Image: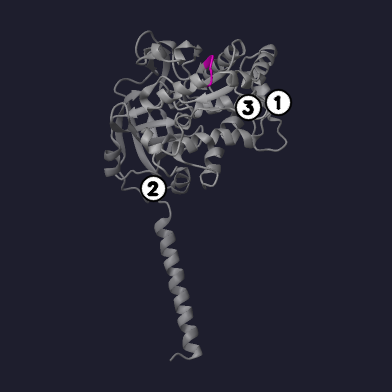
Amino acid sequence: MCDSKSMTCRKKAFAIVLALLAFLVCVAAAPQTAEDAGETPTIEATIYEISKYGNIVLSISPDSMKELGYEPADVILVQIGSSETEMPIGTSYTDADSGEPICCFKFSSSKGVEEVVLAINGGNLTEVMGIAEYEKIEGDPGFTWRLAEGLEQPVTVTISMLQKQGYAEEYQMHQLGGTRSNKRSDYAQLSDEEFANFRAVETTGMGVGTLYRSSSPVKSAYNRNAEADAALQNALIRTVMNMADSEEVMKSYPDYDLTHYADCDIIALDMKMDLASEEFQTALADGFRFLASHEGPYLIHCQEGKDRTGFACGVLECLMGASLDEVVEDYMITYYNFYGIGPDSEQYAQIAGSNIKASLAGAFGVDAIDDNSLDLAAEAEEYLLEIGMSGEELSALEDRLAEDYGGLLQAA
C-alpha cells in the first residue's frame, strides 16, 4: 500500500514519462528539414510531354520516386533550366490551393498508367516557369509548345527534397475522402443529372430555368456525357458556352452529330486553366458576349463542370446579385456530385476557400472575397469591363440572364 509521499513521487515520475513521450512523439511527427532529409537523393528526369494546359509530364513514375524516398506531403524543389520553384507532392491538382504549384502523382485514364505531373492548380506551370511558349496549329492535337531559348530536347528536370512531410497538415485538409469514380453504378444515390454534374443556376437575380452548368455532354472520358446530353435536352438548352474544346476537337467526339448538343448554338472557346492569363480572360469575354447575343436557356461547361465552369458561373452569379454564400453553395454541389463532400464535412470550407473564393478574390483584385463590405455585383462588373466587355454588352448579358424560362419548361 502506498503512502501519500510515495504516491506523489509516482505521480511526478508518471508526469515526467508522459512529457518525455509527448516530446518524442512531437520530434517523430515534426517535418524534417532539407538537412535532415539529406539522404534523400536528388532526382534527374526529363520532360515526357507538356499538356494543352501547361502541365508537365515527367519521364519518371510515381513508384520510382517513392522508392527514392519521395511521397505525398513532401515539399520539393523543381529546377528546369534556369528556373526553379518549390512545390508539395500530392495526388490531385486540388491538393494545392488555386494558383499554387503541385507535383502530382496521378493516374492517367487515357494512358492507363500512373504519372508524375508538375502543374499549377488553375494555372499554367510551363508558362509561369518560362519553359516553353504555347502555339496553336492545324490538325491533331491542335497545339504545340516551342521551347524557350537555351532549352533543348530532352529537357532535364531536377528534383530535390526540401522538407520531408512539410506539407502534411495542408495535404490532409485537401483530401476529399471518397474515391472518385467514373462508373454510374458507384453513384446510385445520385440522379442522372447529378451524376452528370448538371444543374440550374438558381442564385439571386437569375431567371428561372435560364442558366445551367454541367460536365461535358460530348466528351466520353468521364462517362457522363450521355446523361449530360439527355439533361440538356430536357432543359431545352439553346445556347452553349464550351470552355474546354476547340470546334475541331468538339466535333471529333464519337457520335457528335447524333447528340442533342449538336443542335444548339455553340461557341467553342478552347480555354486553358490559367484564370489570370490574358488569353483566358479574352475568351471568357467572348463567351459571355455570345450568351448575350443568343437566346436561352444557356449551358456553360468545360470537361467536369468544376473549375473553369465554376469560375465563370461564379462571376455571373456575383454580377446578378448573388451573395457569397449562394456562390459557394452552388460551386460546392460539384464536390458532392463527384466526391460526396457536403456542408457537414470538415473539408467543405477549406475546399471553398482555396478554390472558388481564392479564384474570385484574385479576379476582383481583393485580399479576401468574404469581406462583408464588398459589393460583389460591382466587383464582377468592374472585372468584366477590365477584360474587355463594354457597358452595353454587360447590360445585354444581365437582361438575358434575368429572363424567365419557367413557362417554356412547363409548356414542354
Q: Residues within 10 Å of mark 2 (few under 14, many from 20)?
A: many
Residue under pointer 1? 378
**Left or right of residue 240: residue 73:** left
- Position of 291 compared to 133: left or right? right
Q: Which residue is mark 3?
A: 317
Q: Observer-nearest residue: 73 or 289?
A: 289
Specify which label sits upstream in the sequence, 1 or 2: 2
Display colour scheme: one colour
Task: Please say if the residues under marks 3 and 1 sit with CB atoms less than 8 Å apart.
Answer: no
Residue 408: give x, y in percent of width and height: 60, 18
Is residue 275 something that shows in the picture?
no
Which residue is identified by label 2?
A: 164
Depth order, front residue of 268/274: 268
For badge 2, the amino acid type reads Lys
Bounds of the magenta segment: 235-240
- Residue 300 in magenta stretch: no
Across and down, in percent, residue 44 comes to: 30, 34
